[in-house]
Structure formats: C-alpha cells, structure tokens
Amino acid sequence: LYRAFVPERASRSLVGAFIVEEAQPSPFSADLTLLVQAWSPDPKMTVPLLTVNGAVSPTLEAPAGGRARLRLINASAQFLRLKMGDAPCFVLAVDGQPVQPFALKDGRVQLTPGGRIDLTLDVGTADPIRLDVETTQLPIQLALVVPVGAGSSAQGQALPAPEALPSNGLPEKIPLENAARFEVPLSGEASLSSFPSLGTVKPGQSVVLSLVNKLEVPVAVLLHGTPARILDGVDDGWKPWWHDAIPVAPRTTVRAALVAGTAGKWAVIGQRGGDGAIVAAQSYDVA
C-alpha cells in the first residue's frame, strides 16, 4: 500500500496498491481488489464518506457459484468494522502474510488503518452480497458483489475450506530470551521530519516493541522493514498472524515481536484513528 501519512496531504496525494501475485495459477473464479478511502467533504458529517477504488458503493461482479478472492486494503485513517453479508468467508492473509485459512465469525472483521486482509467469498447463484462497514449509527454499504452467469448445481453446493497460500518464509518461532526491547509511547503529535532511533540490532536478532497508547482513541502502529507478531500477556506465546499494521486500543499496551531482517533504518509510525494524526515517529536500525 502506497499512501501519504500527513493527514492534510492524504486527500490530495496518490494512493495505490502494490500486489505481488503467487507463482502458481490462481484457484479463484475472480480476484477483486477493494482499496478503501475515507473523505469528509462536510465538517457536519458524523460518519466519513467511504469509497472503494474511487467510487461510492461500487457494484463488483464475480462468477455465480464460484469462490472469489477479495483483497481488502484500508488506505484511510479509520478503523473499519466490516460485515461480509451472509456468504461463507475465509481469511487467507493478514497484512500480506498468509495464514492457515479460517472462517470469519459472523462474517465480521476489523480492518486497521494501513492494514490489508485477503478473504475468500463464496458467491452464490442468486442474491448479491452486500459488504458493509458497521458504525455506531446505520451500516454503510461499502460495495456489492453480484453473481454473473448461470452457475451450476454443483457450484451451488457448499465449497470446502480453501488451501493455504504459499508461505513467505517468515520464521515459525521468535526466540524472546535475548530479545532487544524498546518502548514506543503513543501520545502527543509527532513530526515526520526525523525518526529518532530506538536502538540498533543485528540481522536475525529478535526485537520486542512495547506500544503504549496513552490516548483515549485507538492507534494504528505501522511497521516498516518486517512484520511482527502480537505477544500474549507474559511472553508465553503470540497470536498466529503477522502484522505490519498493529491496532492498539485506547489506554492499553500491545507488545509485538519481530525478527530483524534487512540492514537499514526502519520506521515505526503511530497514526491516531479517525483524524490520522501522527502520534509516534521513531525507528530502529539493523546493522
């Protein structure tokens, strides 16, 4: 995902998705990219105007009875609560990193600012599938997926769970015993003119970032260089997904572990949910 970070430039800058396809032929009947942006044309609006690929609530087509792949990309500063209609959905990847496919509970998923989620969507042979963003008020229709073609009785039956996408080669385990540990406060507004270094680590060394949100609103922490896994409470495990857009709820601390990769200076950016203000701009060095 390419986008501007400075809030006042976000509505006037280029934004786009960079997609690297798998080497194997796609098993999906359709491959749909949905790049979501948020706009506030009227300061009196209580909810933002959402667009998908530059259009308001577009209609997307997929073969009837088939299984489509949806690449959901949040280019906004909003934490989006998505509802995928009543069609069966499986998560394939989080922030570009494959996962063992699992079914969405009640068809709901949160999309963090800067985050990406790849889903399968089983398209029936009759009714369109509505994709909504749930708000404190009425749901907002984000897009409509319409079955096209006749389909077949075999295609109308329930489809088996999808196979996992090929691994990107990230480590299965992160050794935490000798990890470098840094705290990243998420509080007042920060400048993107410089990225003070948290410290220097060696390639292959484990790093634990404590993301401390001191605000009353959620923050998205965006990692450059390599993704991280969110740790459980006392270093006794981690969530099974890799993230480079980490949600941090209000007044909470999230600890994330990564394995330092390519040499360089890698940014850690905190973006306040809603208005997109930058509340952290630091880095770590790999050398």
Image (spheres, rainbow, N blue to C red):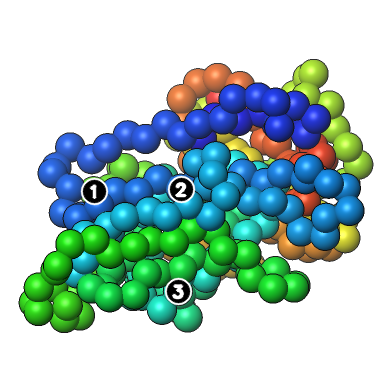
Does residue 283 appear left or right of residue 227 in this picture?
Answer: right
The answer to whether residue 118 of the structure is visible from this angle is no
Mark 2 is surrounded, within 10 Å at the Cα level, by few (under 14), some (14 to 19) or many (20 or more) other residues, namely many
The residue to which callout 3 is attached is 85
Kindly report the distance in space between the C-alpha atoms of the residues bearing marks 3 and 2: 16 Å
**Residue 18 visible in image:** yes
Q: Earlier in the sequence, mark 2 or mark 1?
A: 2
Classify mark 3: residues with Cα within 10 Å, few (<14), some (14-19) or many (20+).
some
Secondary element under disc 2, as helix, strand or loop, is: strand
Q: Amino acid at mark 2?
A: Leu
Q: Earlier in the sequence, mark 1 or mark 3?
A: 3
Occupied quadrant, residue 221: top right
Look at mark 2 in the image and give the residue it sits on.
34
Contact (Cβ within 8 Å) of mark 2 with mark 1: no
Q: Amino acid at mark 1?
A: Pro
Residue type beneath disc 3: Gly
CA–CA distance in space, label 1 to label 3: 28 Å
- Residue shown at 38%/53% (left/top)? 60
Q: Residues within 10 Å of mark 1 (few under 14, many from 20)?
A: few
